């Protein structure tokens, strides 16, 4: 997993704005007790937006 910083700020998946925005929302919810930050990054490391996001589900 490679994290990118640019003029728009931090983007998890530069080629997939939808996935990046949803991941930022997930991290925001983590601070409310919805999950651990480490859990979010673990699952994010398994996601390939090119396959529609199915890669992170049930592969662990």
Image (tube, rainbow, N blue to C red):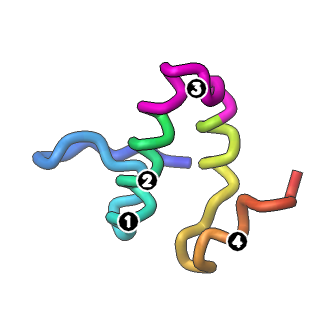
- Mark 4: few/some/many CA within 10 Å (<14, 14-19, 20+): few
Query: Is there CB contact under 8 Å for labels 4 and 3?
Result: no
Residue at coordinates 33% horizontally, 49% vertically from top-left?
A: 11
Q: Secondary structure at mark 1?
A: helix
Residue at image mark 2: 22
Q: Do the residues bearing badges 1 and 3 touch, measured as CB atoms within 8 Å?
A: no
* Residue 23 is a magenta residue: no
User: Which comes before the other along the chain, label 4 or label 2?
Assistant: 2
Q: Earlier in the sequence, mark 1 or mark 4?
A: 1
Residue 37 among magenta residues: yes
Where does the magenta region start and end?
28-39
Residue furthest left in the image: 7
Per the image, label 3 sits on a secondary structure element best described as helix
Q: CA distance from mark 4 to mark 3?
A: 21 Å
Which sits earlier in the primary sequence, circle 2 or circle 3? 2
Residue 57 to residue 26: above or below: below
Tags 1 and 2 in contact by the CB under 8 Å rule? yes
The CA span between labels 4 and 2 is: 15 Å
Q: Residue at x 44, y 61 (%)?
A: 19
Q: Which residue is mark 4?
A: 54
Q: Which residue is mark 1?
A: 18
Is 46 on the left-hand or right-hand side of 50?
right
State the image coordinates of residue 59 (x, y, percent, origin top left): 86, 59
Q: Quadrant of the rendered structure where residue 52 is? A: bottom right
Q: Is residue 11 above or below residue 13?
A: above
Q: Nearer the viewer, residue 49 or 3?
A: 49
Say whether residue 6 is left or right of residue 59.
Answer: left
Q: Using the numbered discs, state the Cα–Cα distance from disc 1 to disc 4 in whole angstroms.
A: 14 Å
Horizontal placement of 17 versus 30: left or right?
left
């Amino acid at each position: 997993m490679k994290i990118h910083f640019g003029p728009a700020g931090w983007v998890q998946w530069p080629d997939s704005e939808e996935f990046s925005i949803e991941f930022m929302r997930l991290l925001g919810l983590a601070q409310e007790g919805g999950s651990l930050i480490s859990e979010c990054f673990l699952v994010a490391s398994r996601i390939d937006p090119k396959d529609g996001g199915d890669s992170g589900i049930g592969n662990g």
